[in-house]
Image (cartoon, helix red, strand yellow):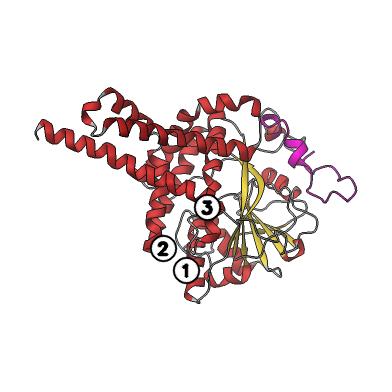
Amino acid sequence: MTELAVGTVIGLVFWVTLVLYGFSSFWWLLEVTVLATGWQADNESEIPLDNIQVRILTYNSPSTVQVTANSVPTGIGATKVIAEAEMDIDGADVHVVPEDFESAAQKKGRAIEWARKHVECEQEYILYLDEDSIIVNFEGLPAADLIQISEHPLRTGSWWVYLCEVFRVGYQREQRAFHRMAYPLYAWGGAVAVRHELENEVTWDVPTITEDTTYIWRAAKYVDQQGGKFEYRLLNRRFRNQAPPTIRSMFNQRRRWMSGTLRDMYRLPKRYLPLQFARIITWTLSPVIPLLSVLAFLYPEFVPQHELYWITSIGLFSMLFVYMIAGLIEYKKYPEVWPIYLVLTPIVVALHAVGAFWGLLRPAKDFKITEKTPGRATKEQPERASAETLADMNPDFDATVMQPNEPEETDEPSSSAND
């Protein structure tokens, strides 16, 4: 190739990357400003607690599950633990998934499908919780086909991972626009509620490693085929859950999310694919934008309209800080160190993208269960006494979530089962 041809190719790469990332950034801004209008339901507790069944999903982490069970409001219809091993949990009925149960679903999806078939439910809604999802400020649900409850991950080990979670929560502010979409773009997190009648029609019996997102796409398609419109609501209660304990475990988690999204995207209507690709571009290319800006500054001869490119790339680079600021506002934690968090944003973005890029290049077919951190060590768990717990790493943890979640007008709650 001639030098001119090489320069043309390089220039195209620079500009195409910038345009794609610019579209994804514009779409996010449109979501959180215009499309998010009216995201809150008129009545966020239309479905009372006694018409909701809580199902806590776990492999075999009784100490973690007990803290979650402690947080369930006393007025809830029923509390079930769906587990892979026998355990005793105060305040909940434990149901163990038989080893010989066959399903196309994998891991958590398999457990949910078994429970759908075999665990009785008299309530209209089921609230699914991961084993580490702790309920706070919960008084009921808005009426919808699926309700996503927002999350507030707690630090469990790495500060870098914690900052990546803050960044992710900021980007997920776009969920406020999903009520306007016939097919919401994703539904993952530690807490999601479904209308039980619709769940029985859709089921969870499909092979996937991102069961929440796949379910919402399949449910939306089913409702669409019935001539209706899928109803989605976001409930901003910020349930507490755990950030991955290590950077490597975060990489594996993000890899699974990206792999599952790519594998199941065929379930989306074609008109939604550009929007989903916009998310993928933002996720994987965010670290590339500042790098291209630097290269364009150092080698302007390779970039047509160099000044325009450089100004535009700097503007898009600033979007990374917008996502981080959105996350910090959602968290409302440690404002005295926000300037430090903002300075670290480029490194955080790069770490956040590694797992997704890994999933793009080498999709995962299975996944490892992320290790959970106990709420606090107790005399019943002497093996945990030397380990850091959530209470150690999150100083306000006890005050906000360790006690059972009871209405304010009741008598002072008794001590937590883990005290």
Which of pointers 3 and 1 indicates the residue nearer the eye? Answer: 3
Find out whether the residues at labels 3 and 1 contact each other: C-beta distance under 8 Å: no
- Magenta stretch mostly in which secondary structure? loop
Q: Where does residue 279 sit, x and y in percent of width and height?
A: 43, 48
Label 2 or label 1, whichever comes before in sequence order = 1
User: Furthest-bottom residue in view?
Assistant: 226
Q: The disc labelled 3 sits on which kind of residue?
A: Val
Q: The disc labelled 2 sits on which kind of residue?
A: Arg
Determine whether, in the image, residue 413 is placed left or right of residue 125. Answer: right
Question: Would residue 414 be counted in the magenta stretch?
Answer: yes
Does dot 3 land on a helix, a strand or a loop? helix
Q: Quadrant of the C terminus?
A: top right
Residue 254 visible in the current orientation = yes
User: Furthest-left residue in view?
Assistant: 2
Q: Quadrant of residue 76?
A: bottom right
Determine whether, in the image, residue 208 is placed left or right of residue 84. Answer: left
The residue at the point 53 percent across, 74 percent down is 228
Q: Where does residue 351 sit, x and y in percent of width and height?
A: 45, 33
Label 3 or label 2, whichever comes before in sequence order = 3
Magenta region = 391-419
In the rendered image, which residue does mark 1 sit on?
221
Q: From mark 3 to mark 1, how far is it between C-alphas?
A: 25 Å
Q: From mark 3 to mark 2, how far is it between C-alphas?
A: 27 Å
Q: Is residue 323 above or below residue 138?
A: above
Q: Quadrant of residue 82?
A: bottom right
Q: Is residue 266 above or below residue 18?
A: below
In the rendered image, which residue does mark 3 sit on?
34
Find out whether the residues at labels 2 and 1 contact each other: C-beta distance under 8 Å: yes
